[in-house]
Structure formats: C-alpha cells, structure tokens
Image: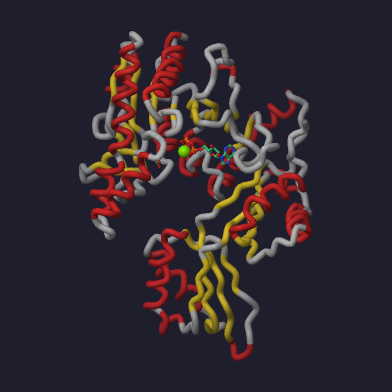
Amino acid sequence: MKFGGTSMAGTERIRRVANLVRRQAANGDEVAVVVSAMAGETDRLVNFCREANALYDPAEYDVVVASGEQVTAGLLALTLQSLGCKARSWLGWQLPVHTVSAHAKARIEDIENDALLESLKSGTIAVIPGFQGVSSEGRISTLGRGGSDTSAVAVAAAIDADRCDIYTDVDGVYTTDPRIVARARKQKAVTYEEMLELASVGAKVLQTRSVGLAMKEGVRVQVLSSFVDDDATPADDLPGTMIVSEEEMERILEESDMERQLVTGIAHDKNEAKVILTRVPDKPGAVAHIFEPLAEASINVDMIIQNVGRDKGETDVTFTVPQADLARAQALLDDKRDEIGFNRIITDSHISKISVVGVGMKSHAGVASTMFRALSERGINIQAISTSEIKVSVMIDEDETELAVRVLHTAYGLDAED
Ligand code: ADP
Ligand code: ASP
Ligand code: MG
C-alpha cells in the first residue's frame, strides 16, 4: 500500500490511513506500506536548500529532502501501534534500498528483502519512507520528485506482492486530470504502455519511472483513493484503476463488453520551455553539435523541429527542454556557439505541451487531424508537433492549456454523460 502526500498531511489523515492499513492486515494479509512526505513538505525542504546555497550539493540536498518521508513513516508506525497493530519503520538504509549514486534523481538497483520478509512473516506491518535509498557510496539518495510511487513498486517487486495499491487523492486514473475537466471519466483499466506514455507527458498521477518498473517486473498496480468511508468497497474488490498488460486489457474489454477507445487519455505539461536556434548551418553534423552537449549534461530534449532550410544553406532548429534545465541549456549552447555556428538563441517558457494517448492509434488514422481541427476551431495556434506510435503532442501557448484540454476531451468523445 502506498500513500501520497495529501493522504499523509496531518494527524487526522494519517489516522485514516492507519485504519485502511489495519483493515487490510485484519484481512489476513502481510502488509508493507510506503509513504510520501506530507503534502507541500518536500517543496518547503527544497526551498530551504535553495536559500542555504543556490548551487547546492545534490548529496546534501538529498539529506534534507529525504527527511519529509522519515517523519511520516515514523508517525504512521506510531499511529498503527496506537490502534493495537504491530508496526515498525524501515528507513532506506535499513532495508537497504540500494540506488545508483546520482543524487536527487537516483535509480533503485535492488532492495534487500530478507529482514523485511522475516518481519512481515512475524505479523509486523512494515512502514517504509518512499523517495529514499542509499547510494553505492553509503550516502542517502532520493529518487526524483514523485518518487515514492517508484519506491512502492520496487518494494512490491522485491517482496513479490500480490498487488501494489497506490492510494492518492483521486479514485483512479481518469481520461484527463479531473481537476481540469469536471466531465473526465474514471477508467477501469489502463495498459502499462499507455500509462507510461501518459505519465511521461505530464499525467502526474503516477511517476513515469514507477510505471516502467511495474511493466518490467510485472507488478499489478491499482490507483485508488484514500479518502473513503469505512463502508467503502475494499481494495481487494478493485474499486480503482488497474494498470494491466495488453492481454489482461483485452480480457477486461471482452468481459465488460466495452469497445476500446481510440484515445485513452489527454495530458498536459507546463514544465517545458522552447529553445530556437536561428541560422544553423544546414549540413551533416550540425544537429549532433547541438544535442551532444545537452545529452552530456543529462538535459532531456523532447520535441525537435528542424525547419525547412532557408537560403544560403541555413536552417532554424526548435526544441523543448525541461524549464528547470533551461538556464543550463542556454549557457551550454552559448558556450558552443562557434562550434555549432548559430546566429541567435531565442527561448520561451510560456508554452505548454498537450498530448493525446491511446493504443487504438496504432491501427486507426485520423487521430492527429481531429486534434488539429478541434484546436484550430478554438483559435489555438500550434507551435510544434511530435508523435509516437500511441501519442500525438502539440506545443501551444501556456495560457490556452486548460481550454485545449477541455476542447480535446470533447472532440474525442471522452466527456462523461450526465
Ligand atoms: P500523491 O501525492 O498521492 O502522489 P499526486 O498529486 O502526485 O498525488 O497525483 C494525484 C493527482 O494527479 C490528482 O490529484 C490529479 O489532479 C492529477 N492527475 C493528472 N492527470 C490525472 C489523470 N489522468 N487521472 C487522475 N489524476 C490525474
Ligand atoms: N515527497 C516527494 C515529492 O514530493 C516524493 C513523493 O511524494 O512521491 O516529490
Ligand atoms: Mg505523486
């Protein structure tokens, strides 16, 4: 069972969580719980780091930001004990959760499970702070924002759990963020592939890496709400959204006599920034010169357009990078100006990316054109486009994000009926 920040925000909510855990354990299950820091806490801790030292050392940043989960893990263990349950906390270094040494964005390599399995067998509920591990150098490490989801899936894989229930503040994965579109519909199931794509283009209900790991390890994941009454449907009856393999999806569709939607979901991402390099030489190797330094600096480039060559063998190159990396990207490119040979660098953070995702696209044409038509009818200008086998993304003005999501939700027939 994994509980996110909103579910863990304060004594009262932790008591609700403890009750859910107690009931699951009373069912006869051995239960491992992964928790997030209280909502807002990690942001607060990140700010302290920035104030202390703008160019902070990521290893010390990890020491600070991992503390939020340590507090909630201890508090949940205490609350469970107050309800008469046997419970103990296991910090990242105690299990241990081994990660690579990349601080602030570490990857889990493996989790030692002997002591944990032993303790679970003795009927003790394990409470594990999410988001943290221990690096190969023996220092505390964190997994990147939203990383408790990944901790939960990794723990589930390590103990060969029947299921990984991700409890959050919505009762499942919807066709789009239900906070933006009131008529968004809850899905019974979503495939790993679709969820991976949705998460990677901004549906932050699950961290992207957690979905990739679940897919690789075959962990059954359910997304469901922790804000439920005592008489609500138990998690074992799968009231949330299941993340499933393609085969299981086919079965679910057949059993429920449902047709597969062309589009499964719509996501948006306001955290990217656009970079334009003007008058780049239109010759072999030019693009490699641009993207190699960015790759070396671990800056992820997403949409890329090389505009039609102008006269004199020159072209403009447009691409997006995460907003958080924009200043670094700009500095790196400025440094390489002579080597790359561009004229000007133009940047814009006031953009957003809207994506429609669905496995049905593999076999159906027309998904992209529906998108372009619907946006144009509302006067929304498209600045760039990128596609994958199961996704179409467009870049638009950030102010039009919510409108675009609503318009597309209707255009693909996803709105819930009254
Ligand atoms: P937690 O703190 O539990 O990890 P998050 O805030 O990380 O919770 O993720 C839950 C939020 O994800 C929801 O409150 C919702 O606004 C947002 N969200 C975005 N896209 C979707 C979607 N397609 N379905 C459900 N929730 C979504
Ligand atoms: N507390 C961490 C964050 O806010 C990890 C998580 O909640 O998943 O990013
Ligand atoms: Mg989250």
Q: In which quarter of the image is residue 51?
A: bottom left
Front residue of 254/168: it is 168
Q: In this view, does 102 lie to the left or right of 374?
A: left
Q: Number of marks in the image?
A: 0
Residue 117 sits above or below residue 95 on the image: above
Residue 373 sits above or below residue 133 on the image: below
Q: Quadrant of the C terminus?
A: top right
Residue 131 sits above or below residue 18 on the image: below
Q: Quadrant of the N terminus?
A: top left
* Residue at the spot 22% in from the left edge and 43% down from the top edge: 139
State the image coordinates of residue 323 (x, y, percent, origin top left): 46, 60
The colour mode here is secondary structure
* Residue at the spot 38% in from the left edge and 66% down from the top edge: 328
Q: Quadrant of residue 77?
A: top left
* Residue at the spot 50% in from the left edge and 31% down from the top edge: 168
Q: In this view, does 166 lie to the left or right of 260?
A: left
Residue 211 sits above or below residue 172 on the image: below
* Residue at the spot 49% in from the left edge and 84% down from the top edge: 343
